[in-house]
Every structure is written in C-alpha cells, then in structure tokens.
Amino acid sequence: MGSRTALVEDLMERFPQVPREAVFKEDLLRGGVAFDPSALSDNESGEVKPKSYFIFSFDHGTLPELGEAALRRPPEEIILTGGPYDLRRTVVSVRVNPTSPYRVAADDEGVLGLYLDGKRIADVGVPPMPEYYRHKLSNGKSVMEVAPTIQWGYLIYLTVFRVCQYFGAKEECQYCDINHNWRQHKAAGRPYTGVKDVDEVLEALEIINRYDTAKVSTAYTLTGGAITSRLQGRDEADFYGMYAKAIEEHFPGRWIGKVVAQALPKDDVQRFKDYGVQIYHPNYEVWDEYLFRMYCPGKERYVGRDEWHRRILDSADVFGARNVIPNFVAGVEMAEPFGFKTVDEAIASTTEGLRFFMSHGITPRFTTWCPEPTTPLGKANPQGAPLEYHIRLLQAYRQTMDDFGLSSPPGYGPPGPGRAVFSVSSFMDSLPAQEAAEV
C-alpha cells in the first residue's frame, strides 16, 4: 500500500470489531511518533508532564539521535480525540521516532494535533504537570526520578533497580534495553538512580499522597531488573518485597500494590504476599518454546521455560488466579531471525499461550513491542512486527477471554474504548466498557 493511512484504513475496514482507536494506538506504539518542537515539553519546569523514561527507553533512537526531543522531553503520554475518525479518548505512551509518518505539532492557533502523512487526524491532549512533580525530596531529587506516574496518573512506577543482572549477549533478553537505557542516561548526565533507597521512595510517595488530593494515583508497581544472585545482601523476593513492606506499613491500603519480578518458587511468592503485594506479574515474555530459548537466554538458563510456567501456575495458589497477571512482549513472535514468518503462525502461537493461562483462570496482559535500536532484535527489525499482527492479537485476546468467561484484570483501571488509561498496549481499550473490579 502506498501510504500508512491506506494501511490503517484497510485494517479498520477488515477488522471492524477492533476499536478504531486501538488500530491507531497500536501503530503509534509499534512505530513511534515524531514531535515538532512546538509539541515538546519544558522538562520539569514547564506546564506539561515530561517523559520520565521509567524503565526502558521506548524510543526508536538513542538520546543523541533524537535531536531537540532529547533536550526538551516530549510528554509522558498523549491523548487522542476527535478528528476525521471521531476518535474516543485514547491514552498513548510516547515512543519517539523522528522518521515516523505520525507527527505531533501545533497549528497556527497553537492547538496540538496528530498528523499522519501530512493530514491532521486527531486532536492531541498532553498531561498537565502534576502538583507533586513540583516538589523535591529533602535530598534534592525529583519525584519524577524516584516515583514517576504513568497511565495518566493512575500508576506510580517504582523501578527500584534500574539495571538487570542478566547481562551481556548470552543472558539479556534480546528485545530489552534496560541496561542500555541506564547507560545512556548516565552518559547524558541525567539523574538516573541505580538502586533507589527505601526512604527516598517513601518520601516521594508521601509527596504524591499529600498533593494528589483527588487520589488519581490508584496503584503502584515495584519492578526492576532480574536478580540472579543477591543485591544488597537480599534475594529477589526480599529485595523487592522490602519496598512493599515499607509502603504498606506507611500507607496501608492507599494504593493497589503490584510487583513485576521473575517467576519465583512458591515460597518466595508467598513472601511477596506476606509483604503486602496484591498483584504479581511473573512475565513470560514470549510463548513459543524455541523463541523463548533464543530471545530470553538468561531466563532459559537460570529457570527454563517449563519451570517458569509451572511457577506462574503455582503462584495462583498464593495470590488467586485473578491476581496473577503475566506480561508478554507482543510482536517479538515475528522478529527476525528466528520469529514466525507469517501473521497466521504468530497469532496461532500467541493464542495457544493465552489459552494455556486463561484455562487456569490467569489473565495475561501485553506490552506492544517497541524495537529499540540498541537491542539485537531492534537492530534486526527496525520496523517491528506488522500492524496486522497487533490488530489480530487484540481480536484473539478478547475472543479467548470470552471463551473462558474472564473479565478485565484488576489494577489497570477501567476497560473500554474511550475509558482505558493503560498506555503501553491497547488490550484494555479493546475490552468491553464495564467497571473493573479492583482488588
């Protein structure tokens, strides 16, 4: 097809059951968006909430390659509404790509819009600077550095360990740039704390709690790199668990507590529960056995795919199946050199994984793969997976949930087009618009 517009419109016509908002959102997440200087933020001194780089870069270029967007950060997220497609309110995580056919720019009246192939297709809203970002910790660090919020303020994202002990080509997940993201921010002289102090986290949360009077922030996620040995004398369950314990002691019941960690043995998972964690995300990354081995070599070496899956099922005995929500990276199924060659094959494989977990009452969720250029898969697949894969995945995901009588998972806010706030994939935008039953 001659233009991206033609591709998008063709897919909207072929898959009318997938919300049109989700088609655009997936395309922006997989391929990124360019920003005119008129659409950039003034960093932490402005009126727009800037991109925090909360764990990965989620960009299609390194900081030196992003031009002015590396100096004046783009917004953390954007909201799309209206335009010729009459889009309902759609929250999209920002992934910068200076060469994208999508561009955010201000018109002659200073009103931001999203342009595709040079045509304005939606109005763009940007997140206002939250009051809690305007206050510093006692040591001078910013709240955005210690406890950034995403999903339009719904989720506090606590990356308390900014690197991963799966290190080097033989251990790092082949799509993951957590270690490079750490290095590039340090090289640029930006504050980017490697291991966050528990007291710093508590102080940042106190500031959020004080100034978030509307209680928009509803959940927190504790996460970071894998710990294969020990960190500060603690294993993975105790390291991440100590933050949960401190948060729940200081702010009992204020937020839904979530942790993203490896698939750990049942006794370790019980420690998470004992520390006050309510939702466990033991991410399985990619379903196919061969691709897991090739793309997640460290996880295969230290745990192994079959054991990883057994541990996910075991964790449902601790948290309840509904509160075990493993993530996969949607799109790496089609990544060269080892991925599936056709969309049909990739969807069949991914759906097999969805059916496996959902048949046990466990509802996975997914992040749309962003091919970051410093990763092996990003270098080999700069265009990512075909947009058709992502649209058909949304269709298969909802159908599989319906087959097993499952509803939207807790801790993600409301589902439905025009209502969802989960910003790094469209799975919540594509589910029925009903109230999510939070934990």
Image (cartoon, helix red, strand yellow):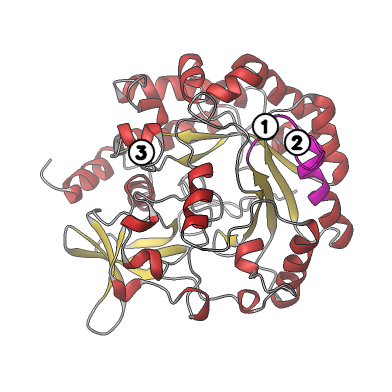
**Residue 414 lies in what quarter of the image?**
bottom right
Q: Residue at x 60, y 24 (%)?
A: 299
N-terminal label among 2 and 3? 2
**Residue 252 lies in what quarter of the image?**
bottom right
Q: Secondary structure at mark 3?
A: helix
- Residue 264 magenta-highlighted: no
Query: Residue 68: horizontal and vertical position, in percent?
Result: 33, 68
Residue 236's label in the rendered image is: 2
Query: Residue 118: horizontal and vertical position, in percent?
Result: 16, 62
Query: Residue 187: horizontal and vertical position, in percent?
Result: 48, 56
Cα distance in 3D space between marks 3 and 1 = 28 Å
Residue 236 vertical placement versus 94 (above, below): above
Q: Could you tell me if residue 49 is visible in this image?
A: yes
Q: Secondary structure at mark 1?
A: loop
Mark 2 and mark 3 residues within 8 Å of each other at the beta carbon: no
Q: Residue at x 22, y 54 (%)?
A: 101
**Residue 152 lies in what quarter of the image?**
bottom right
Residue 391's label in the rendered image is: 3
Mark 2 and mark 1 residues within 8 Å of each other at the beta carbon: yes
Q: Which residues are magenta?
A: 225-244
N-terminal label among 3 and 1? 1
Describe residue 214's horizontal placement relative to residue 51 as left or right: right
Residue 276's label in the rendered image is: none
Q: Residues within 10 Å of mark 1 (few under 14, many from 20)?
A: many
- At label 3, which amino acid type do we have? Ile
